[in-house]
Amino acid sequence: MRGERGVALIVALMAMTLMVALGTALILTTTTESKITRNFAITSEAAYAAEAVLERAVDDMLMVNDWTSLLNGTAASGFVDGTPTGTRALADGAMLDLGGAINIANCQKTSACGDDEMNRVTDERPWGLNNPRWKPFAWGPLSRLTPGSTTSPFYVVLLVGDDPSECDNNPLVDGGDPVPPCGAGSSFNPGAGVLSLRAEAFGPFGTHKIIEATIARNANHPNRSVRMLSWREVR
């Protein structure tokens, strides 16, 4: 009996250790699942936010007769939040460099882009002189897009660029004169009347969603409707 003294205490300590381990594992599992659920919900909301500003921008573009004014930055949506430069405070306190976000789209860096950098052939921008020169068209907090109907924490930006199928080597003009060899013996420019759109949504916990689309004027009603030619989520 003397040799068994303290066994109950050891067993109790082992049981307590096991229970603590199981409890810790349960807490970690619950926390991880909560984060996964939260991240999925935020990512889904970011996609909806990007789609919302895309739809709003397309509606505003119906009021613009000359799409070259979209490409050179002289036309803008009614949904804007000051100038497209400087920083914006996001809902979680993080800061968004709006001008830097536009530069990243054009040359993959936050500082100002030079012509050579924007014309450079890369995996993301393989069209050289016809690479889109992304210009801001609509930007602001999503909550201001439809006041009173949403309290979304996302900040959204819509950029517009020339369709890269054009062969005029001038991304600031819609449907310019074709340049050989694309335009050899022909005045047809395949990208005339076609725009590339890039919608971005920025939100809590570093969430960033990008949707790119291509639209074209409706041949039957060129000033009243457009056709969606392509849509994709950028991974």
Image (spheres, rainbow, N blue to C red):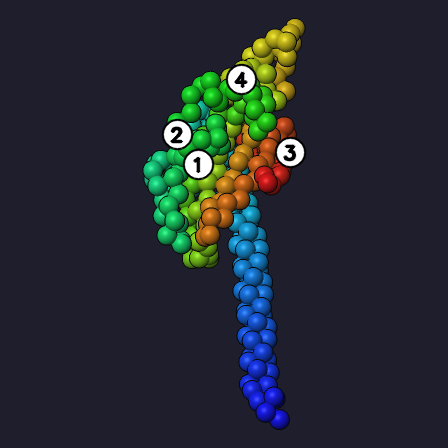
Report if residue 229 is visible in the image: yes
Report if residue 164 is visible in the image: no
Mark in the foreground, 3 or 4: 4
Q: Position of residue 208 (x, y in %)?
A: 50, 45
Which dot marks residue 101?
1
User: Quick check: 59 left or right of 103?
Assistant: right
Residue nearer the viewer, 67 or 8:
8
The CA span between labels 4 and 2 is 20 Å
Mark in the foreground, 3 or 1: 1
User: Hey, what amino acid is under mark 4?
Assistant: Leu
User: Hey, what amino acid is under mark 2?
Assistant: Ser
Quarter of image, res 84 = top left
Q: Is residue 112 above or below residue 43?
A: above
The CA span between labels 1 and 2 is 9 Å
Residue nearer the viewer, 202 or 159:
202
The CA span between labels 2 and 3 is 32 Å
Question: Looking at the rendering, in which quadrant would you find the C terminus?
Answer: top right
Q: Residue furthest top?
A: 185
At horizontal 39% and vertical 34% (from top left) the residue drawn is: 99
Judging by the rendered image, the residue that carries numbered circle 4 is 129
Which dot marks residue 111?
2
Q: Position of residue 29 (x, y in %)?
A: 58, 65
Q: Is residue 216 above or below residue 36?
A: above
Judging by the rendered image, the residue that carries numbered circle 3 is 229
